[in-house]
Amino acid sequence: MRFMVIVKATAESEKEGALPDPQLMEEMGKYNEELSKAGVLLALDGLHPSSKGARVKFSGKSRTVVDGPFTEAKELIAGFWLWQVKSLEEAIEWVKRCPNPHCGDSEIEIRQVFEMEDFAPILSEEQIQHKVERRAELPNQTANK
Amino acid sequence: MSATDPRRTIEAVWRIESARVIAGLTRLTRDVGLAEDLAQEALLAALEQWPQSGVPENPGAWLTATAKRRAIDLFRRNAVAERKHQDLARDLATLEQTVPDLNSNLDDPIGDDLLRLVFISCHPILPTESRTALTLRLIGGLTTPEIARAFLTPEPTIAQRIVRAKRILAEKHIPFEVPRGPELAARLSSVLEVIYLIFNEGYSATAGEDLIRPTLCEDALRLGRILAELTPIEPEVHGLVALMEIQASRTRARISPTGELVLLFDQNRTQWDQLLIHRGLTAIERAHKINTTRGPYLLQAEIAACHARARTPSETDWPRIVILYTELARLSPSPVIELNRAVAVSMAHGPHAGLALVDALASDPSLARYHLLPSVRADLLYKLGRHSEARTEFERAAALTRNTRERDLLLTRAASCETDPTNP
C-alpha cells in the first residue's frame, strides 16, 4: 500500500526565501538514501513557502483566487514523500527514523493513498481459502510458472 | 487503534530490519539457515519484551545484538565438539565488544552482506520454487503465512520449501559471497529470474480464473528496487526494474470492473499509473548511462516504454518496437518472440509483411498448440480481406485456447467473417 508522508510547515519554513539548514539537508539526504535502498521510496518533493503559492476558493459556481502567504503555518505543508510499504505501522516505523525536519518542534503526517482494492476487492478471504484448497488438491500446479 | 498495537509494530520493525540482521548474522556464522533461526529467536524475544519495555531506540541493533548473544551461547555449548566454532565464538565476542552497533556505522559492508544474501537466496543450486520462497522470506521480510497466501499455496508447503533450501545450502557448503568474474553474469541472471517470477506470479492471470495479485507485484518491485541500489552498475537490473515498473503501471487498467482481463490495446490509458511509468523510464535512462549494451530485460522494458509513451494505440512507435524485437530475437531466439515481432512488423509495415513472418512460424512444432499463432494469422488474413481463410484460423484458435472468455471472443470474430457480404 502507498502512503503520502507529509512534512508540516513551521513559521520558520514559511519565511520568505527560507532554505533548510545544510546539516539537516545532509541528514535528510542520508535518510532518503536509506528509503531508496529499502525499496520504499516512490517519490518526494519539497515545497516553497506559501508566499509563492495561491488558493482557489469555491463557492457554488464562483471561484475566488487568494494569493499566499497563508498564516496558519501548522495547516500548511512543507514537503512530502510517497512510500510503498506493507502497513501503516511500517510507515510509522520509517517516520520515526526520520531526522527532525525542522529546528525545534515539527510534525509529520502519514496518510494512506487510495488503491484499486479500496474500490473493488481483488480477492476475498473466502476466495483465497477456496483457491488454496483447490491448489492443494492439484500438486502439479503448485509449482511456479 | 492499530498504530499502538505492539505486535504490528514489531512486525513492521522486522520487515524493515530483518534482511540486514540476517545478512550480518550469516557473515558471522557462515550459515544462512542458522542465521535465520537466530534472527527468529531474536524476534521472539522482541515479541516477549517490547510490549512491556517499548520498542528500543535502535530496534535493528537490538535484534542483531540479541541474536549474536544467542549465537555465542550456542557456539560455547558446541565448542567442545568443534574448534571452528570456538574461533567463531571468539570472533563474535570480540565483534560485540568492538562494534556495539552494527547497523549505524557499517553502511557499506552491510550493503555487501545484503547483496551476498540476495545471491545465496537465489542460488541456482536451489529448486526455483525454493528460491522464490527463500528470497521473499529473507530479503522481502515476509512471513511464511504471507508467502503462502501470496502464492495461494498451503503454508506447510512453503515452510518445506524454505527448510529444503536451507538444508541444500548447508549441505553443499555454498559460500556467502558476491560472485566475481564470469560467474557473476550467470548468478545475476538467476537473481533477476527469481524476482521476475515473483512479479509474474502476481501479474499474470493464469488459467483464466486467477486474478491479479498486486501485493506480490509490489513485493517483487521492492526486491528489484533494493537490488538496483545494491548493484547500480548492472544495466540489466535497471532493465528488470523498468520492465516491472511499466508493467505494474497498467495494473488498474488491466482488470475490467467485472473482473476480466483487458488487453493492452483495449485498456483505458488514462488509468495507467504515471508515477510508475516515470519511474520505469528513469530506470531505463539509468541503464543507458552505464553502457550501450542491451540485455533481454532492458529490451523488453524499452518495448514496454514504447507503449507507455503512446497516449493512444495509434501513436505507438511500431518501427522502434520492430527494431527492439529484432534485437531481442537475436539475443534470445524463441518462436513466441518471433510471433510478437511479426505483429509489430504488421503494425509498422502492413499485414502483408507480418503474414510472411507468421507463415514462416506455422511449421514450428513448439507453436503447434499455441492459440495465439492462428489468432494472429487470422487477424492478418482478415485485414488483407481473405475472410474465409481468416474464419478457419479464428476457429482453430478458439479450439486451442483454454480461456473461455477468449474463446467467445475468437468465435465472435469467426462469425463476423462469415457474415461479411463482400467476401463470402
Image (cartoon, coloured by chain):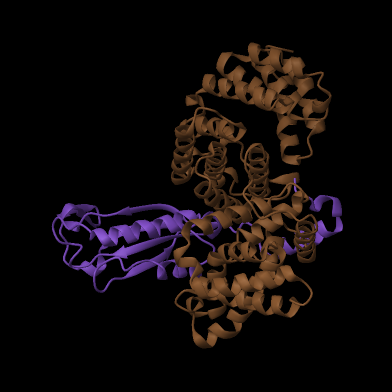
Q: Residue at coordinates 48% horizontally, 56% vertically from top-left? A: B108
Q: Give the percent coordinates (x, y) of residue B71.
A: 66, 74
Q: Residue at coordinates 52% horizontally, 57% vertically from top-left? A: B109
Q: Nearer the viewer, residue B127 or A9?
A: B127
Q: Is residue B371 visible?
A: yes
Image quarter where the C terminus of chain B lies is: top right
Q: Nearer the viewer, residue B322 or B143?
A: B143
Residue that sits furthest to the bottom in the current view = B52
Taking B390 as reference, is B131 above or below it?
below
Task: Name the image quarter holding residue B347.
Answer: top right
Q: Residue at coordinates 44% horizontally, 33% vertically from top-left? A: B289
State how many labels appear. 0
Is B55 situated left or right of B129 in this image? Answer: left
Q: Give the percent coordinates (x, y) of residue B393.
A: 77, 22
Taking B256 as reference, is B156 above or below it?
below
Q: Give the percent coordinates (x, y) of residue B4.
A: 48, 79
Taking B424 as reference, is B396 above or below it?
below
Chain drawn purple, letter? A
Q: Nearer the viewer, residue B54 or A75?
A: B54
Visual hue assigned to chain B = brown
Q: Give the percent coordinates (x, y) of residue A130.
A: 76, 62
Q: Is residue B63 visible?
A: no
Task: Name the image quarter holding residue A35.
Answer: bottom left
Task: Name the image quarter holding residue A5.
Answer: bottom left
